[in-house]
Each structure stands twice: as structure tokens, then as C-alpha cells.
Amino acid sequence: MLKYRSYTADNLHTLPQYGEIPEEQIHIVKTVATVYPFRVNSYVTENLIDWSNIPEDPIFRLSFPQEEMLNPEDFQRMSGLVSTDAPQDIIRQAAREIQLLQNPNPAGQMELNTPLLDNEVLHGIQHKYRESVLFFPSEAQVCHAYCTYCFRWPQFSGLESLKFANNDITLLLDYLKEHPEVKDIIFTGGDPMVMSTALIKKYIQPLLDIPTVKTIRIGTKALSWWPYRFTAEHDSDEILSFFEQIVSSGKHLAIMAHISHPREIETSQAVDAINRIRSTGAVIRSQSPIVRHVNDDADIWEAMWQKQLQLGIIPYYMFLERDTGPKQYFEIPLSEAVEIFNTAYQRMSGLGRTVRGPSMSCAPGKIIVQDITEIHGEKVFVLKFTQSRNPEWTNKIFFAEYDDDASWIDDLSPALGHEEFFFENEMERLYTCS
């Protein structure tokens, strides 16, 4: 019988591999987990983590909090509270003070992306790009395990006022009737694949009768964190049958798999899940940020993309770590990201060159760092919008002054004598009106 065991900071002592984690590391996990949520499950601990290589193992760093995720002062503060068994309300208050300074909702998600219907705010829905809408099912506000780098950490942290969640699909349907330009619906969270098939049907089935909706996406880490969702759970066959129904209805179904390291898709369980999903006619696309300590190496990305191609997964995006939460621990400079991307990309056949990146998902849109070059004697970053808040910006190229230390758009200055980037005035107006 399939057994699902989930471990948090509260029951970490029940983890079978608990004795293999140094005592100091256990204290680190419990301390950092007061600020950033920690959850891991038995599949990850039994199949993906190399317990002989703790704490350096990349999957361990991907799933277990690390000390450097907090700045030294915050770590010492929380460590002291944990060590002295301070009351939980005192710990929560201290954690909140830290969390609210970590840019919990970056890129204008709350201010600019939340749409209105009849002058009512549609919480749990985001409409940033003209053709695409995100929906956050209330029942999907958890994951099978939490990635330490996750930019949506506020969803799991009890920050209710900053959380995106909605359980009323009729609101989305009414909004789509008013916005026929929307062709693409993305279900996200959390992870929609923590829901039962019945709940997934509740949200997706009504969309099959809307002719303006052409594509449906499901963002999930389940292929890596719990592939049994597609192979061995009580309703695995039912969810695959529903995938077939979606495809048969004429909609394109894309499973947006978050794969950060090749080891995640090397297990027999993951391969079985991938094969079963693809047999329904659904397409699997892979995306992940490039993050320090986990996959900041061209060999890792090449191996990951090659394995994805072998399994029939389409490499889609290499993202840059968003400017929120523990960014300082995971981020890498733009210059390093470009070198890693280009090195891995050059080793791929044409089939693997579907991937785009390194990409910053920032307030104006998805901005790719295409290259580093020299123009009129000035060293510059070549940047391009691959998706944009204003559709007219899409595919536009612009330039920024080269900066060794820059890791995000906010670190960059316009190049070639320009005083501001071409989109800045419009962005300022949007923020003023929001």
C-alpha cells in the first residue's frame, strides 16, 4: 500500500534519516523554518537525497532550509528564540517582522496583476499578460514538498493578506466572458496536483466549453516531488483519463513541470509518471530558476535538458531567482547566468533549443538576458522582452550597462547614453494608478 509521509520542522525527529543529519543542521532547519516554510516527503527523502553528502547534496539544499537563507542578524535572533523554546506567538511575531521586509509579493503581483470584475477585486486570479490568466485554487495552496528557493513562499507562511486563493470558478468564467482575448489559463498555487481529481475537474471542466480558451496549463512539481500522483494514487487513472478528455475537447493541455536538477527525473517512478502523462496527449514543458548551490553549472543544465528531451519533455525556461525571500543565498550574477545558459545551450541539438533564458520575471514582463557584447566601445547586456505587460514591448531589444554584480533588472542602468529604459514611464503610470 502506498504510504505518504510528510515531514516538517515539528516532526522532523520521525524522519528515518534523522540520525544522518548533523545536530547543528537540524537546529538550522528548525530556525530558518520559522521564517520560510519547510516541508518534505518520504518520496524525496528515500529517492532523491544523497544522505552521504549532507549538507552539500543539491536536493538536500533544494528541500531543507539553509542558514544563509537568513541574514546573520535575523538568524541569530530566530536561533535564540528557538533554542530557548520561546512562546510560539513571540516566534511568529519575530518571523513576521522578517518576512514583511523580504518583498513578499514581487513584480507587482498584488498591485498590478489582480484584475477587477464589475469593480470587484478578483482575489486568487492574476492577469498580467493579455492572452494569459493565472488561477490559484484555494485547495491547492500547499505542495508535496517546498523548494527552498520558491518565490511564492508567502502562500505557505500564513500571510493571509498577501495570499492568492480562490474557490469560485464562476468568477473566472464571468471574467473570461468579458475578456475574449484570453486564450490561455494557467492553474498554479502551491501545486494544483495536490488536489483530488474531483477538485481538478471542478475547476477545469467548465473551461472546456469556452471557445475562446485554447490552452490549459497546470504548473506542478509533482513529477519530481510525488510522481505517484500519476501512477499509484487511488485516482491516478482518473486524472489521466481527465487529461485525455481535455485533449479530446480540442484544448491544448500543458503540464508545466518544475524540474531543477536532472536527478529529479532519473528515478523509475518519475519516468513512469512522465510516460503516463504523455500517453494522454498532454505535453510536458520544463522550467526552473538557475540557483546557487543547486544547479549553477552548465553541465547540470545540459544533463537536465538532454534527459528531458530523451523522455519527451520540452525544455521551456531558465529563470533567474526572483527578488524576494532568500534571494541573496540563491541568486547568481546575470553575467554568470548568461555564460552557464550559453554553454549548455550550445551543446544541445535543435530539439533542445526550445528553451529560453536566462529570464527575469519582473514587473514589466519576462526579460531575457540574451548576451553580453560591446557597442561603440561600451560593454552592455543585450536584453529582450519575451513576454510583456504591454504587448507592444514583446520581442523588443534594449541595452543595459554591463555590471559584474547585477543579478536583477533593478540593478541595471540604461546603456548608450539613455537616461531611462523605454518602458519606465509607463510602468510608473501603472503603479500610480493602482
Image (cartoon, rainbow, N blue to C red):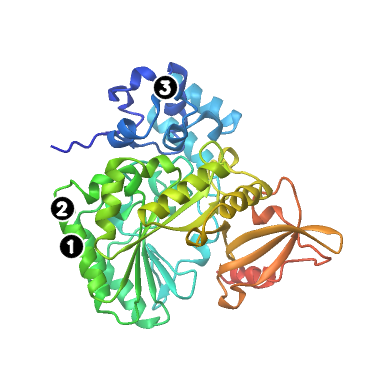
At which x and y percent is residue 330?
Answer: 56, 40
Mark 2 or mark 3, earlier in chain:
3
- Res 34 seen here: yes
Pointer 3 residue? 52
Of marks 2 and 3, the one in the foreground: 3
* Three-letter code for the amino acid on which mark 1 is drawn: Ser
Left or right for 98, reference 255: right
Question: Which element carries disc 1, helix, strand or loop?
Answer: helix
Q: CA distance from mark 1 to mark 2?
A: 10 Å
> Which residue is the site of mark 2?
235
Classify residue 250 by image quadrant. Answer: bottom left
Query: Furthest residue to the front?
Result: 349
Question: Of helix, strand and loop, which one carries label 3?
Answer: helix
Determine which of the numbered discs, if any, sits on residue 382 in the image: none
Q: Label 2 amino acid? A: Asp
Of callouts 3 and 1, the N-terminal one: 3
Q: Is residue 82 above or below residue 329?
A: above
Residue 327 placement, left or right of 195: right
Crowding at dot 1, Cα within 10 Å, few <14 / some 14-19 / many 20+, comes out as some
Identify residue for label 1.
241
1 or 2: tag closer to the N-terminus: 2
Q: Cα distance, mark 2 to mark 3?
A: 35 Å
Q: Quadrant of the C terminus?
A: bottom right
- Rendered location of residue 235, percent (x, y): 15, 53
- Residue name at image x 79 percent, y 62 percent: 415
Q: Nearer the viewer, residue 240 or 175?
A: 240
